[in-house]
Amino acid sequence: MAHPENSQRVLSAAPETTVVSHEAPAISVSAHVDPHKIGARRTAVTFLLALTGCTLLYLAFAIQGKWFSAVSERFFGADNLVMARGSAVREGGELIITRAGQGGETIVSVVTDLRSADFPVIAWIAIDVPESAQVVLLWHTDYEPGLLRKLPLRVVSGRLLPASVGADSHWTGRITGLAIAIHGPLVQPIRVRGVIANPGSAKQTMLDRIREWTALEPWTGASINTVTGGADIQDLPLPLLLVVAVVIAAAALVWRLRQHLRAMAPSLAVAVAALFAVAWFTLDARWTLNLVRQAHETALRYAGKDSRNKHLAADDGTLYAFIEKVRGVLPQSPARVFVIADEHYYRGRAAFHLYPQNVWFEPYYNAVPPADKLRAGDFIVVYQRKGVQYDASARRLRWDGDVTIPAELKLLDGGGALFVVR
């Protein structure tokens, strides 16, 4: 028979044993959770929310039409364009303006049938527009058919920025015609690819930004140092969007963990580094894609061709073809050859293609050789140079400052000519 005291001890000890057995699993589970780590899921969700917020905030200021619209953009290509004033040729899906109209005014137009309320943004796709030129958007409407309305356009880096016409009180009814008027001399041919009527909706705005981000960046003089990818002019550069999203996401994580900031500092640093790496690799992926496309374009242009055909396929192929004809006229033994052109690129490339002739050209300034330094037998190569005139009856060449020299025309081809001093 148990002693009463022993029974009391057993009864009092039992609850203590039970409590310990129930608390043991909780201690075991919590030992596997580190409260000082930020999960990858939380970091990813925070970054995506920051990126989405930045995008929506941008759209709130950027869209110029309805947030949601069933209308798609309308594109009128070079085949639809008409030269109202000036001269141009069509080549490779572009209308290349080669000469301004009378009085230095060039006008390109297109017949349209657009509902003005559906298209509040008009974008002319043109390249090599002079920075000093005054460019105006023109349009006709069925509401005021006898009136020609206009709106100034901005030129940035040789391109025309889109025009916001939705707020213009004269942008009403149906738009029956669009045009651009360029006032000023043409320092080089202007390439016009067409005009886009844009609904300006949220969807279309984002599609435009994505097209800008993924547009092919061709080889340039700076490609050896840096290639960023995307269009030359971007309304919202992708690096800017990613940087702002990373900063906001990092700030959100800091604010959320502010009460345990000291304990969470190492984990927070890893999370911010991960956000930075994601943004970095996103831009690197675009750079790599652009490089692959560049290599493909280069292979299509040059692969399997000999040296001559590679030169003809290059961007200065027209110049090379002209210089090839010039070399056929020049004597075999090196002669003194002077090269003049408006663009320093053409001067340098023409001189390169003319070697081993004794070539003179001005690499930095658009200058002509001093008349008193020329002598009989010297050759003068003129390529796309304004202000040079030749009097065939008098056999005299005239250029800047009304300077004239006796010369004979030996070759005339497109925008180039070869003369020999008499």
Image (cartoon, grey):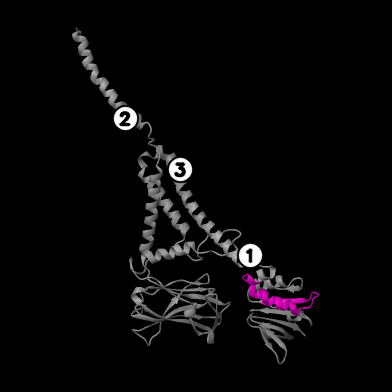
**Horizontal and vertical percent position of residue 201:** 36, 67
The answer to whether residue 162 of the structure is visible from this angle is yes
Give the magenta range: 312-340
Q: Quick one: 253 or 411, which is closer to the camera? A: 411
Is there a contact, CB below 8 Å, between mark 1 and mark 2?
A: no
Rendering quarter of residue 165: bottom left
Is there a contact, CB below 8 Å, between mark 2 and mark 3?
A: no
The structure residue drawn at horizontal position 63% and vertical position 70%, both measured from the top left corner, is 313
For label 3, the crowd category at 10 Å Cα-Cα, with few meaning under 14, some 14 to 19 and many 20 or more, is: few
**Horizontal and vertical percent position of residue 290:** 53, 60
Disc 2 marks which amino acid? Ala
Q: Is residue 333 magenta?
A: yes
Residue carrying label 3: 270
The structure residue drawn at horizontal position 76% and vertical position 73%, both measured from the top left corner, is 357
Disc 1 or 2, which lies upstream in sequence? 2
The answer to whether residue 220 of the structure is visible from this angle is no
Q: Secondary structure at mark 1?
A: loop
Disc 2 or 3, which lies upstream in sequence? 2
**Horizontal and vertical percent position of residue 148:** 40, 84
Q: Please identify the quadrant where the N terminus is shown.
A: top left
The structure residue drawn at horizontal position 67% and vertical position 76%, both measured from the top left corner, is 321
Q: Quick one: 131 or 275, which is closer to the camera? A: 275
